[in-house]
Amino acid sequence: MIQEIFVPRSGRPDAPSRVVIGEALPLLGELLDGRRPVVITDPNVKAACPELVGRYPHVLVGLGEGCKSLATVESVCRELLRLGADRGSYLVGIGGGIVTDLTGFVASTYMRGVGGFGFVATSLLAQVDASVGGKNGVNVDGYKNIVGVFNQPDFVLCDRGMLGTLPERELRAGLAEVIKCGLIGNRSLFGLFEEETFGSFTADAAKMHRAVADSVGLKARIVAADEREQGERKLLNLGHTMAHAVEKCTGRYLHGEAVGIGLCVAARVSQQLGTLTAAEAARVSAVVEAMGLPSAVGPESGIEPEQLLAAAASDKKRTAETIDYVVMEGIGRAVCRRLSLTELGELLRRSL
């Protein structure tokens, strides 16, 4: 089964970004026909898919968030120079969110932009979020995606077969972004998780397909309305202000795990603001926990609340002494609130 979703690109009305979900990998050869591709990937993907990666000249990047840096960008550019890549070259990121972020950033900046780029998303998180929509960035001093560009790929292949060898922890992390999409604007998608366990949900092929398709569909609609995050696209940051703070301060959580914590904190903040009932906030935490995701930063982390608050206050969504924070108005609807840093701090202290 194949499903295609097209995401409009500003300045290119006749060439939307094409997201293919299902048995998508066989399309890669056709998509690269006539191009001069160079693959960017990581050692794990190369080991799992040697025949795929070995078809093309390729550059390897490291593993983990620490590798999503300007130093890695410089290293990749040096390798591209060594391989003779020029403005007519075509970059293909085969990997998870770190690989796709780096590929999009390099494709947009190497020689001021190459001939195009596309992704084969090999993790659930990349398929439902990181590789779709054109945000490409790297971290600086632990601050997530603080340097980056908006530039959508020509295509994203979300092949379900790629998820077969994914570690269980990575699958859980990807589900956090699906839960987020349900909370933002798809109540029935959130409802898919209720009364389910991680095992029962991921064993259901139809539900997993819908998880990817509905998440991409929601993101496509939002990006079409607000490609450069001036308004509605900010809703996709639900749970991410605290998630990024957790990642920066602890270094022990995957991005999706931190998003799980961020969603539960956002639910408690929303309850305090009167936009979410206690029962609804409890439903959010129950689903996050049922998928095996953390819902809070435990005392074993050794992180003081003030450290998290300081990191949250430095989020890139901050403007002077205010910050845009996404809250829930019931299940399946979210809105962006501009809060003072003082107000946000008080709300977070009571929600951690």
Image: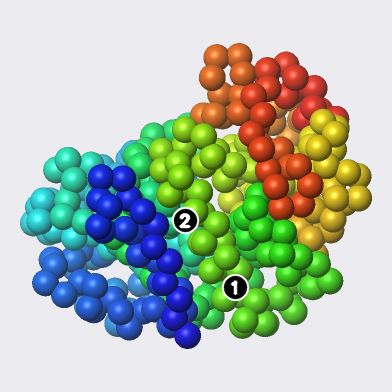
Amino acid at the residue labelled 1: Arg
- Using the rendered view, name the quadrant where residue 336 is placed: top right
**Whole-percent x, y for residue 186 in the image:** 66, 58
Q: Identify the coloring.
A: rainbow
Q: Is residue 47 above or below residue 155?
A: below
The residue sitting at 57% across, 45% down in the picture is 236
Looking at the rendered image, the quarter that the C terminus falls into is top right
Residue under the image location 35 percent in, 42 percent down: 150
Can you name the residue that lies furthest to the right here? 279
On the image, numbered disc 1 is attached to which residue? Answer: 210
What residue is drawn where x is 56% and y is 61%? 215
**Image quadrant of residue 287?**
bottom right
The number of numbered discs placed on residues in the rendered structure image is 2
Q: Is residue 349 above or below residue 288?
A: above
Question: Is residue 143 visible to the viewer in this orientation of the structure?
Answer: no
Taking the image as drawn, is residue 276 in sight? yes
Q: Amino acid at mark 2?
A: Ala
| Residue 326: percent from left, percent from top | 66, 37
Q: What label does residue 296 carry, if any?
A: none
Nearer-the-camera pick, 87 or 207: 207
Where is mark 2, residue-wise?
Answer: 220
Residue 183 pos. (x, y %): 70, 52
